[in-house]
């Protein structure tokens, strides 16, 4: 008795898997529609730029000058006036209660002191619970009063008849994203993240479900070879993954203005290699779990570090050195670099060969590992 | 003296409690028989916290910057040296403006400083001397920080050249910054309250949803209905072990945060426990609702991830401040219990807030818990009839 051809074996499993997936509307919704909703919500929510920090103004001078300084300090939008307070202790109480995150205390006689050339001291009180917000607020206040001080110093030198000191002016030119918007950078990252969640979990849990309900054993008594069985099972999800990428890219360009500067061929190559590695990981997880609950938890044990150490949410450069070394085996990191490189910077295969090669290596290793484990389990 | 009606009500309650206890111990056996799940549920939070504490930071150091020195003078070399000496920037290689773009594409540099020809001459003549900074703007966060850093370094360099130190000694306006609660600006202190919300959301929602959906999937739920245990008792008994598991996770995360990251506890620990308990009730309710609606584990996972995990990380204010979000998302965030837990925990742990501040957070979570538990119980009944 001879087994049917590999092509027939794969297509048999493929058709069964597709039918099973399509028949459950809720699964299709989760695979196709949910990632779209998440991209839109997350893309709109994630904004690294800190502004509108609720700020109290404690104007103890109450002069025209102090009012003018308060107005100009708040003008750039980083600090948002949340109200007034009579004194610094009162401002601290307001910050305690969470009604403001910063307070600027303008001292008595500020205007008069500046005119009379006496040194003045401005106090800034910050809610430090969010270090990011605190540093943005501090930078805004220091920037304004620092500039004011520098201008006054120059003016005084000029009045004293001394030569003005030289001045180096930094002229920034921003490449790729001149308005420094967060979305074009974040949305491709979110797409990478959703893709790994969908593909890894679905593969891991799908096989675990068959094992749980005993249907896997039934399939294994058929003449089908384990390798073709796995391939046929993965193929539909590879296709769903590619469709998801297309949809997410469409939403990205249409809603968030993500540019497409590089070659889509390199991008597609990256997507396929990436899916190869995420599906392989899902498969591997399913071979080490007995139940869907375990598969889910195992999937999360992989997913969460992979997302955190990918450079999608926070830059890899700000991680400690040993953790940066760990990220080399993270497929998510390489894919994020590929997709951002292609879309935002117009990078080609010459710039991204290392990331692509790493994706291929990671994919081949987990796939191989999963296949070996699967075969020994079956035997 | 208690009448017979009261006594029988008491007896009924006692019998009901026995049934809930039986359900709970059955569920506890499920959890215990599956040590892998239990280990993952307890180990995962610690691993995550560890990674978060060390790995998640938006403070940037050692940003690679290339310097294109077209002037090749003593002054221009001094500027390049100053950039490298700050410790915040690494001067990678000296290339022209065109080569800088190639470095950007490969991710080898995030900026290029172009010092024009005639830099030293302009500087000596006291004119305004421009230097161009080409920045890879793809990541707005990095780009913003980088421009600010280079500007600060160049300003310091200007002062050095001009010998303005004397003038700086008594600047006209001095800014004194006083940072409350977290003066060293440590990310971990900020992250741990958010992280605990997120981990609890995962443990509570996902595990409950999976456990109950699994029961539907295997058909054992029908068997349970055939027993004298009531619907409400099934729900209470099933949720109880996960409530305990969630509380253990919560304490584990906080204890680990205190030991490893010096998380301060300025307020009352009782209040912290109450916050955790109410939040857990909300999350268990959500898990129940998800499982009642999904009734198979695959769908329950995805629905749980969509409705609990992502809001807990994105809309809770854990990383991204809620007040910076667009209006509709702020409204959406005001439903998310994680937002209240993060706010409440930060208030109690870092600021030492008492009940007079966090009652609003408790109320927000409590309302959510009541709503989801109510809807889930209703749906649970209707599905059986």
Image (tube, coloured by chain):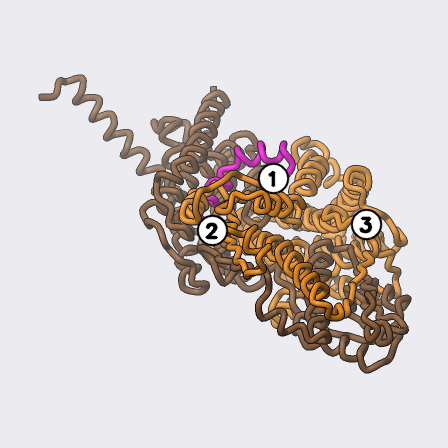
Chain colours: A orange, B brown
Q: How many residues crowd around disc 1 within 10 Å: few (fewer than 14), some, or many (20 or more)? A: some
Q: Is residue A188 left or right of residue B204?
A: right
Is any atom of residue B272 visible in this view?
yes
Is any atom of residue A276 visible in this view?
no
Identify the residue shown where x is 81% and y is 68%: B113
- The nearer-to-camera label among 1 and 2 is 2
Question: Mark 2 and mark 1 in contact (Cβ < 8 Å)?
Answer: no
Q: Tag 2, which secondary structure?
A: helix
Q: Tag 1, which secondary structure?
A: helix
Q: How many residues crowd around disc 3 within 10 Å: few (fewer than 14), some, or many (20 or more)? A: few
Residue B368 spot, x, y in % from top left = 46, 31
Q: CA distance from mark 3 to mark 1?
A: 42 Å
Q: Which residues are magenta?
A: B325-347
Q: CA distance from mark 3 to mark 2?
A: 58 Å
Quickly name the residue at label 2.
Answer: B193
Residue B203 vertical position relative to residue A28 in the rendered view, above or below: below
Q: Is residue A340 left or right of residue B26?
A: right
Host chain of mark 1: B
Residue A264 vertical position relative to residue B99 in the rendered view, above or below: above
Asked whether B342 falls inside the magenta stretch, the response is yes
Q: What is the number of the mark on residue B306?
A: 1
Quickly name the residue at label 3.
Answer: A4
Asked whether B383 falls inside the magenta stretch, the response is no
Residue B12 vertical position relative to residue A48 in the rendered view, above or below: above
Q: Quadrant of the C terminus of chain A?
A: bottom right
Q: Observer-nearest residue: B202 or A118?
A: A118
Host chain of mark 3: A
Host chain of mark 2: B
Q: Earlier in the sequence, mark 1 or mark 2?
A: 2
């Amino acid at each position: 008795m001879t087994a049917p051809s590999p092509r027939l074996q794969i297509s048999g499993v493929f058709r069964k898997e597709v039918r099973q997936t399509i028949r459950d509307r809720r699964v299709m919704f989760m695979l196709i529609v949910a990632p779209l909703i998440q991209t839109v919500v997350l893309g709109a929510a994630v904004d690294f730029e800190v502004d509108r920090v609720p700020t109290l103004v404690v104007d103890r001078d109450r002069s025209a000058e102090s009012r003018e300084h308060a107005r100009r300090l708040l003008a750039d939008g980083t600090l948002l006036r949340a109200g007034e307070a009579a004194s610094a202790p009162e401002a601290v109480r307001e910050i305690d209660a969470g009604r403001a995150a910063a307070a600027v205390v303008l001292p008595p006689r500020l205007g008069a002191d500046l005119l009379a050339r006496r040194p003045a001291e401005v106090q800034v009180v910050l809610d430090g619970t969010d270090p990011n917000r605190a540093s943005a607020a501090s930078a805004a206040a220091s920037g304004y009063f620092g500039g004011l001080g520098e201008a006054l110093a120059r003016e005084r030198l000029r009045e004293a008849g001394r030569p003005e000191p030289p001045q180096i002016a930094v002229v920034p030119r921003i490449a790729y994203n001149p308005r420094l918007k967060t979305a074009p950078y974040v949305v491709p990252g979110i797409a990478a993240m959703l893709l790994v969640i969908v593909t890894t979990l679905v593969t891991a849990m799908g096989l675990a479900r068959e094992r749980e309900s005993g249907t896997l054993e039934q399939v294994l008594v058929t003449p089908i070879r384990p390798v073709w069985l796995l391939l046929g099972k993965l193929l539909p999800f590879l296709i769903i993954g590619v469709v998801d990428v297309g949809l997410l890219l469409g939403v990205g360009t249409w809603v968030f203005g993500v540019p497409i500067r590089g070659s889509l061929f390199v991008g597609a190559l990256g997507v396929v290699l990436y899916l190869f590695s995420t599906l392989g990981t899902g498969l591997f997880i399913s071979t080490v779990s007995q139940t869907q609950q375990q598969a889910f938890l195992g999937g999360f044990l992989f997913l969460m570090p992979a997302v955190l150490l990918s450079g999608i949410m926070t830059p890899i450069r700000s991680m400690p050195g040993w953790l940066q070394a760990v990220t080399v085996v993270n497929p998510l990191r390489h894919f994020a670099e590929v997709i951002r490189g292609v879309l935002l910077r117009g990078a080609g295969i010459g710039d991204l060969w290392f990331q692509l090669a790493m994706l291929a290596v990671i994919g081949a290793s987990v796939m191989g590992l999963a296949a070996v484990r699967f075969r020994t389990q079956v035997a | 003296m208690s009448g017979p009606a009261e006594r029988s009500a008491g007896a009924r309650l006692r019998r009901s409690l026995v049934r809930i206890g039986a359900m709970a111990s059955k569920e506890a056996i499920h959890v215990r028989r599956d040590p892998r799940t239990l280990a993952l549920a307890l180990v995962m939070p610690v691993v995550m916290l560890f990674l978060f504490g060390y790995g998640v930071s938006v403070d940037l150091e050692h940003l690679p910057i290339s310097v294109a020195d077209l002037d090749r003078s003593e002054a221009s070399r001094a500027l390049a040296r100053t950039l490298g000496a700050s410790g915040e920037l690494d001067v990678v290689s000296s290339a022209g403006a065109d080569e800088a773009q190639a470095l950007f594409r490969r991710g080898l540099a995030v900026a290029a400083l172009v010092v024009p020809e005639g830099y030293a001459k302009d500087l000596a003549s006291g004119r305004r001397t421009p230097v161009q900074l080409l920045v890879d703007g793809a990541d707005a966060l990095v780009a913003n920080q980088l421009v600010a850093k280079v500007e600060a370094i160049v300003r310091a360099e200007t002062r050095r050249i001009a010998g303005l130190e004397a003038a700086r000694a008594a600047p006209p306006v001095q800014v004194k910054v006083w940072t409350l609660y977290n003066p060293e600006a440590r990310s971990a202190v900020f992250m741990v309250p958010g992280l605990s919300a997120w981990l609890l959301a995962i443990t509570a929602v996902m595990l409950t949803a999976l456990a109950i959906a699994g029961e539907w999937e295997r058909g054992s739920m029908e068997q349970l209905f055939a027993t004298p245990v009531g619907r409400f008792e099934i729900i209470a008994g099933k949720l109880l072990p996960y409530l305990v598991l969630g509380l253990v996770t919560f304490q584990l995360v906080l204890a680990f945060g205190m030991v490893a990251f010096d998380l301060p506890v300025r307020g009352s620990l009782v209040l912290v426990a109450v916050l955790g308990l109410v939040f857990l009730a909300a999350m268990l309710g959500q898990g129940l609702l998800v499982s009642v609606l999904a009734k198979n584990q695959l769908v329950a996972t995805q629905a749980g991830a969509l409705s609990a995990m992502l809001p807990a990380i994105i809309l809770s204010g854990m990383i991204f401040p809620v007040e910076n979000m667009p209006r509709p998302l702020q409204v959406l965030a005001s439903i998310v219990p994680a937002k209240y837990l993060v706010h409440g925990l930060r208030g109690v742990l870092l600021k030492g807030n008492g009940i007079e501040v966090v009652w609003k957070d408790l109320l927000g979570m409590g309302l959510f818990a009541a709503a989801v538990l109510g809807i889930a119980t209703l749906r649970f009944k209707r599905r059986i009839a």
